[in-house]
Amino acid sequence: MANPVEQFKIEPIVPLEIGGVNVSFTNSSLFMVVAVVLATAFLTLSVKGRALVPGRWQSMAELMYEFVANMIRDNVGTEGRKYFPFVFTLFMFVLFGNLLGMIPYTFTYTSHIAVTFGLAIVIFIGVTIIGFARHGTHYLRMFFPHGAPLATAIILVPIELISYCSRPFSLAIRLFANMTVGHIILKVMAGFIIMLGIAGIAPMVFLGGVTVLEFGIALLQAYVFTILTCIYLHDAIHMH
Amino acid sequence: MPQFDTTYFASQLFWLYASFIVLFILLSVFALPKIGGVLEERQKRIAGDLDKAAQLKHEAEAAIAAYEKALAESRAQAHKIMQDNAKAIAEAADARNKAIGDKLAKQIKEGEGRILAAKDEALGHIREISTELVRASVEKLTGQSVDDAQAEAAVTAALGGKA
């Protein structure tokens, strides 16, 4: 039985080094590029016809656009419009990473903590900058809610500070853990099918169900990642 | 777990940011304005069609109002013409009735005059005839001849002394 975590192994395809730092083009990088190409192709080719009554592909592209646009409008408000391209790119990047990973023999770049944390920390820093740019030092009120007695500051401020600073970690770990665990389960189940021979029909049925569930999780985690970004943006723009 | 192997952390971050920035540029320059344009165009088209429909409805309502006004006017005019005609006919009929009535009244009066004259004349002859009748009757019944004076006296007595 193959090691279930072997699928997460990063293999360099083109070894590369810039300024003494290893930036090799790996299987992870390959699927990021594939995701970029597919997402761009999907979103440009589908609306090429500019049909008044959309076809299947155009409907899907429009659906994605309106889905993210509504998400921003509902969670951030009208000030969120200028962040729409970033949030949409984020959604597409995570969604395509998750979905590409569901194809056998592919690499799931969203199952790596380095990638999810790399995204989360950019969002965290960006949101913090937006908060301070909009509210100045008043943004520090985030850590001490209005109306709370001053004496409670000694407890509330550290709690709020910790909760604020744990955002990138929860964001990164949620996506990474979901993707990793899902793929491990799929791999282990697939191993059982081979091991049990004819009795492997039972884990195969189970695997079918889990695969459907994993597709759901792929969509859901992309959605969760994006909507949390929207909520953080909302906090930065409107405060609590 | 390979996830915690730091060997490729730098590589992953480098390619993550590189591909993310490329995707961001591609989407915000090419894809998103296009999709947004299509959606906006459709929205405009629908709004335009709705406006046009509202305008056409308005026009139809105006046409109906004009038609109804014309209809009401025509009705009023027709009514007036009918009334005028009826009045004219009634006047003409009245005039004719009156003329005929006058004529008839005149004729009746003339006729009455003639009847009266004829009656007077007839009454005037009654005494003569009666006298003659009396004389002839007496002569026939009695065989005696009666003279005119006697007969006339008898007639006068029978008529109640009236001459």
Image (spheres, coloured by chain):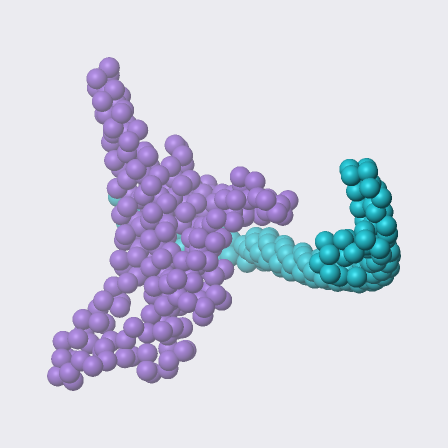
Chain colours: A purple, B cyan
* Residue in front for this viewpoint, A53 or B125: B125
Residue pushed farthest front?
Answer: B144
Quadrant position of the N terminus of chain B in the picture: top left
Indicate the quadrant where residue A237 lies: bottom left
Residue pushed farthest top?
Answer: A198
* Residue in front for this viewpoint, B148 or A160: B148
Residue B70 position in % (x across, y down)? 73, 60
* Residue in front for this viewpoint, A169 or B73: B73
Residue A64 position in % (x across, y down)? 47, 50
Indicate the quadrant where residue B107 lies: bottom right
Disc count in the image?
Answer: 0
Residue depicted at 64% across the width and 56% down the height:
B57
Residue A212 position in % (x across, y down)? 33, 34
Indicate the quadrant where residue A179 lies: top left
* Residue in front for this viewpoint, A46 or B135: B135
Left or right, A234 with reference to A53: left
**Please, is residue A7 above or below residue B57 in the view?**
above
Residue pushed farthest bottom?
Answer: A150
Quadrant position of the C terminus of chain B in the picture: bottom right
Residue depicted at 41% across the width and 67% down the height:
A77
Residue A190 position in % (x across, y down)? 28, 27
